[in-house]
Image: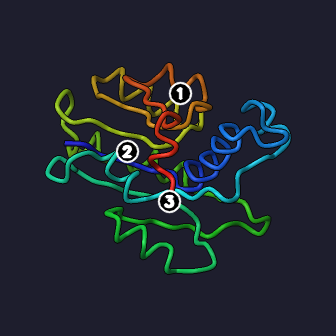
Amino acid sequence: MNFTYVDNSNVFLEGRRASAVAKKLSGAESYIEAMNNKVLDNTWNLDYGLLHQFACGDAENIGCAKLWGSPPPSDSFWQMVESKGFEVKTYEKNFAGKEKKVDVAIAHQITKDAYSGKISKGIDEVTLVAGDKDFVPVVEDLVENGYQVHVVFWENAAPELKAACSKFISLNPYLDNLTK
């Protein structure tokens, strides 16, 4: 079984950055340049159905497919994401407009699912769709304890996270396929 956990804003915003770099938009000749110049391709949109299919695999092998984020202006967005097969969990942004609680909530859920026995060590796979190095301690711990942890993310995922997981799968070669 595959247990998939997605950080929505992380995969969405970095997808826009990956698209900017792929299109070589002004100020985005590389990821570092795009990050320093805060360049995103605001015309790019993620196809959540294709992300679900790519990250989670066959329907009969899905243990869970959970996606976290902060509510956008319209609730119809979350309804659309749910219709694509994800269980959605949202948290309000703080007063400064920053997303809070999401990384901790994802790490908590993965840990809870693994150590409660919901995820079978050596049999099931954990798929994390996020690129933050905040996830390194959880991923390292799971891998050290015999869990298979795949990180599926854009090429600019934190090097520490790529090194910690059992397998890293770059979304960059699939950018066009994941574009809505």
Distance between the alpha carbons at the discs numbered 1 and 2: 15 Å
Front residue of 113/175: it is 175
Label 2, label 3: how many angstroms apart (C-alpha)? 28 Å
Residue at image x 70%, y 52%? 41
- Name the residue that disc number 1 marks: 161
Relative to residue 19, is residue 69 depicted above or below? below
Residue type highlighted by circle 2: Ile
Return the residue at label 2: 110
Q: Residue 131 location, x and y as percent?
A: 56, 37
How far apart are the two marked residues, 3 and 1, measured between alpha carbons? 27 Å
Residue 150 percent across, percent down from the top left: 37, 32
Label 3 environment density (alpha carbons within 10 Å; few <14, some 14–19, many ≥20)? few
Which of the 4 image quadrants contains residue 97?
Answer: bottom right
Three-letter residue code for mark 1: Leu
Task: Judge by depth and name the residue closer to the eye, 160 or 77.
Answer: 77
Which residue, given by chain and number where applicable, does mark 3 sit on?
180
Q: Are marks 2 and 3 in contact (CB under 8 Å)?
A: no
**Spot occupied by residue 15 in the image (x, y as percentages of width and height):** 59, 47
- Element carrying mark 3: loop
**Local SS, label 1:** helix
